[in-house]
Structures are given as C-alpha cells and as structure tokens.
Image (cartoon, rainbow, N blue to C red):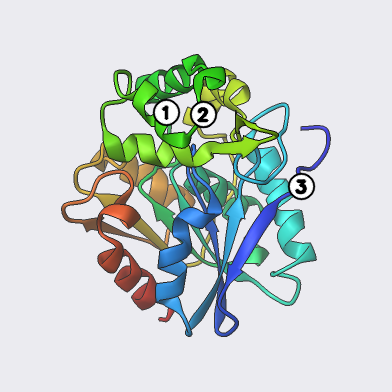
Amino acid sequence: MSVSPSLHATTVGETGATVVFLHGLFGQGRNFTQIARALEPEFSSVLVDLPNHGRSSWTDAADYVEIADAMAQWLRDGVAASGPVHVVGHSMGGKIAMVLALRHPDLVERLVVVDISPTVSDGAGEFVHLLDSLARLDLDAVERRADADRLLVEDIPDERVRGFLLQNLRSRDGGWEWQANLDLLRRELPVIGDFPAVEATFDHPVLWLAGDRSPYVRPEHAEQMRRLFPRTRLVTVKDAGHWLHADQPDAFVSALRVFLGA
C-alpha cells in the first residue's frame, strides 16, 4: 500500500464516549447503524468503511499492518486527536482492530473483538465461493437489483447472505458496479485469512465475543489470544453465528454497554 487509503466514515450520535466500528469482509460501516443508534446517548459511534469496501478507496494490497497503521494515522488526525477511543472490530475488521491495538495502544481505550481470533482463519473456501460467484455475475444483464438477486440464487441460495453481499452493488451511469474491490479481495484472501506476527501485547481490557454456532473462535485459540491480550474476557453469545451482531443484536448491544461503560 504505497499511498494511505482515503477512508469514509459516518458518525451516529453526538454525546458520550466514542466507539469506532470496523466491519468484516464484504461489509460496510453502515452495517452497524442500528447497533450505533441503540448505544445512544451514552456513546457516539464512528462507522468506518475499510479500504476496498464501501466508499473508501481501493488499495493494491490487503496487508493488516499497513491498514492498521493507516487507520492509526486517520484516528490521530480525527476522532482520537484528543485521546483514545473504543474500537469494535468484526471478523476481518477484528483482525485490523487487534493489530491497531497492538501497534498503537495509545489510541485504543477498550477493544471488542467480534467472532475472530488472532490466528489463521478457517473457512477460506466459503469466501472463495462467494467471491467467485459475485465475479461471475454478468452485470450487463442486470437492470434492477432484483435481477442480480435472481441470478445469484443458484450459487448462493441463502437469501440473507445474498442480501448482505448485494449491499456492495451500486448503480452508476445507467449501469451497475461493485463497490468492493473483488479482484483484490479474491487475490489477497490468503493474507486476509492469516494474522501477522506482531511482537507486542495490549494491556487494556478486551472483550472477545463469539457466536456459539460459529467456527471462528475455538478453545485452542484462547492461549494465543491471552498471550497478546492478557486482559481478555471471552463471552459466547447463544444462538448466534459469525454475524452475531445481526443474529442477536440485543445481546450484542447489552454486552457492549456493560463492557464499554465499565
């Protein structure tokens, strides 16, 4: 990443401590809008579009250290200019949040890591399938968003997953295009699934949230998590998968309120 990416963010709320949300692969900052509104007025939320997603700029690599360092500079110049902020990161955003906290601990007051571990993540095959399915979609055959949904049914039968992915499709100049940088994400998927070696520890409180139906947080990950983040508390959310903030939003908001307000 030779040039720091331009980051787009939306702020929800005007009072209380600042919480910065970092979404996962295929996501956008707006995915946390309802969560952010539920945290008002005790917290104001900054919903970031990560590089290669949403309205933020594209890059030529998906290096976690470079992205975390760019995020650190963006925070220093903006919402963290007067002091540290809380950071909540889900999945890929959780890995960026962990690297950010490890390399720039002065910027992060409390950290929430949502359904990901500081290890190599399994499940790459699923994301390869999703990325390939989106790349195969003939956008010239799409007149309305409903057409794209119909054309993806065979490859992606889960209506909810299709709806989430199609948030990345936008209308422009009479046609359609992907907001997410699909080519880069597909090429860099092994890097996205990995976790960089960072020789540091983050000695602030950390809440580690896991969905009980998700494979991304496992008992064998706990040793590495606590080595890097010795003040970690793991909470498993019942009846929740990888997108636990969508599966159990009330439980998610409650956990954030208790932890960030402590």
In the picture of the structure, the residue carrying the numbered disc 3 is 6
Residue 147's label in the rendered image is 1
Proximity of marks 1 and 2: CB atoms separated by less than 8 Å? yes
Q: Quadrant of the N terminus?
A: top right
Say left or right for 255 vs 224: left
* Cα separation between marks 1 and 2: 7 Å
Say left or right for 55 vs 115: right
Q: Quadrant of the C terminus?
A: bottom left
Coordinates of residue 148 in the picture (x, y in percent): 43, 28
Q: Residues within 10 Å of mark 3 (few under 14, many from 20)?
A: some
Coordinates of residue 20 in the picture (x, y in percent): 56, 63
Q: Nearer the viewer, residue 31 or 93?
A: 31
In the picture of the structure, the residue carrying the numbered disc 2 is 143
* Residue ID at (52%, 23%): 189
**Dot 1 amino acid type:** Asp
* Residue ID at (41%, 66%): 35
Q: Nearer the viewer, residue 43 or 160?
A: 160
